[in-house]
Image (cartoon, grey):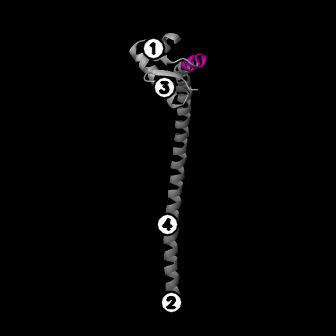
Amino acid sequence: MNVIELLRLLQAEHDETAARADGLREQIDQLATALTEVEARLAEIVTTCNVIDDLALPDRALAPEEPATTYQRIVTAFNEHPGRVFRVRDLHELLGLPTDEPSLNVTRSRLGRLVRQGLLAQPGRGRYQKRT
C-alpha cells in the first residue's frame, strides 16, 4: 500500500467519522430540546399539584379533627374516672354520644385501639378501664 492510498483511506474514515459526529450532535440538540420541554411540563405538573393540595388541605385538616376530638373525649373520661370500669353504652351516655348500634361499634373499635396502644385495659368482655 502506498502513501497516497493510505491518505485516501484516512480521508474517507475522517469524512465518515465527521458525518457520524454531526449526526450525534443533532441527536444531542434534539434530546436537549426534548428534555427542556419535559422539564417545563414537569414543573407545571408540580405547580398544579401544589395548588390543588393547598386548596384541598383545609378539607383534609378538618376531617381528622372529629375522630381526634372523640378520642380525646374518651381518654379524658377515663382520666377523670381512673378506677371506673365502663361499658361502651355507659361511656356514650357519659359523653352524650348517640347510643345507636353503629355509633357504639365505632367506639368499640376506638376502645380496642386504645387497649392495643396500652392506654386502656380490658378487664372483661365489653368492659374497659384506665390502665394503671
Residue marked by disc 1: 89
Q: The C terminus is located in which quarter? A: top right
Q: What's the distance in space between the residues labelled 2 and 3, CA to CA?
A: 101 Å
Where disc 1 sits, the SS reads: helix
N-terminal-most mark, 1 or 4? 4
Image quadrant where residue 100 sits: top left
Q: Is residue 24 magenta?
A: no
At 53% from the left and 54% from the top, the residue drawn is 29
Q: Residue 56's spot in the image, x, y percent?
A: 53, 25
Q: What's the distance in space between the residues labelled 1 and 4, CA to CA?
A: 83 Å
Image: 55 above or below 37: above
Q: What's the distance in space between the residues labelled 1 and 2, CA to CA?
A: 107 Å
At 52% from the left and 68% from the top, the residue drawn is 18
Image: magenta residue range: 73-81
At 56% from the left and 21% from the top, the residue drawn is 75
Looking at the picture, tell me which residue is in the foreground, 36 or 128. Answer: 128
Residue marked by disc 2: 2
Q: Residue 43's spot in the image, x, y percent?
A: 56, 39
N-terminal-most mark, 4 or 3? 4
Most common secondary structure along the magenta stretch = helix
Image: 36 above or below 131: below
Residue marked by disc 4: 20
Single out the residue that lies furthest toward the left: 101
Of badges 2 and 3, nearer the viewer stands 3
Of badges 1 and 4, nearer the viewer stands 1
